[in-house]
Amino acid sequence: MGTLGGISVIFDLDGTLVDSEPNYYEAGRRTLTEYGVADFTWADHEAYVGISTRETVADWKRRYGLRAPVEELLAVKNRHYLELAGSSSRAYPEMRRFVELLAGEGVPMAVASGSSPAAIAAILARTGLDAHLRTVVSADEVARGKPAPDVFLEAARRLGAQPARCVVLEDAAPGAAAAYAAGMRCVAIPYVAAQADAPEFAAADLLVRGGQEEFTARAAHDWLVRTARDR
């Protein structure tokens, strides 16, 4: 049992631990351009923040009338993304400090992400976070992506943790909804500022309204300590 009273912490990856959304947008833009969609904007991309890559490309297929199979679109987008992620993935400094703080206290941790296993591995290796985050679940490994709770429940299972003793860190509304559906507490750090008032975030146990600019490892750790004491 860790020093935080048996609490385990599960991190979303993209937009929570790592500032990877610009790479996901660029990978999406390049993919859609290959299939004749030339006007995919950042605002279009924001609608997919927090949704698995597989579900994103399936929606593109419907929205843009693409003839290519979902598996082909997924492969092309993942190829573009891995090219970008391998050279320019950046962990948020305070999130890195938070992970290191928890690791030093023996807190069980996992990553639960909508990205492919290869993309998750590439990002964690590139940022060095793989030194502390060895339990990893991709939405590709479970039946349903966020907002379904499957990835978080599987992460808890692999950690040997009760869902009620898990705290999830999330930047997107679908992920916050997934955390609640899993019966877990949620620290919400909205990536898209305009979504800070989303109902999924309003129910957060801790809402860092200002996003990553406001998040600090120390404040999050102090909140976890209080949470462990209150349980």
Image (cartoon, rainbow, N blue to C red):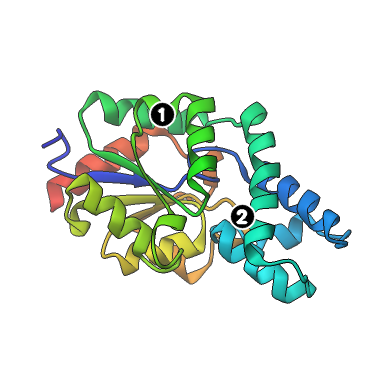
| Mark drawn on residue 95 | none
> Considering the numbered disc 2 on the image, is that residue within a helix, a strand or a loop?
loop
Residue sitting at 46 percent across and 39 percent down?
215
Position of the N terminus, as image quadrant, is: top left
Q: Is residue 204 visible?
A: no
Query: Residue 128: image x %, image y %?
Result: 46, 24
Q: Amino acid at mark 1?
A: Asp
Q: For the point 17% across and 48% down, which residue is it?
A: 160
Is residue 195 left or right of 140 when viewed as pictured?
right
Residue pointed to by mark 2? 192
Give 139 or 191, whichever is nearer the viewer.
139
Q: Nearer the viewer, mark 2 or mark 1?
A: 1
Residue 87: where, in percent of width, then height? Answer: 66, 27
- Give the quarter of the image for residue 192: bottom right
**Residue 130 badge:** 1
The amino acid beneath tag 2 is Val
Q: Are there few (<14), some (14-19), or many (20+) residues within 10 Å of tag 1?
A: some
Percent x, y for residue 231?
13, 53
Q: Residue at x 58, y 57 (%)?
A: 53
Question: Does residue 107 appear left or right of residue 11 in this picture?
Answer: left
Figure check: 54 above or below 75: below
Q: Is residue 192 above or below residue 200?
A: above
Q: Residues within 10 Å of mark 2 (few under 14, many from 20)?
A: some
Judge whether 194 appears above or below 131 on screen.
Answer: below
Label 1 residue SS: helix
- The answer for how far apart the CA atoms under marks 2 and 1 are is 26 Å
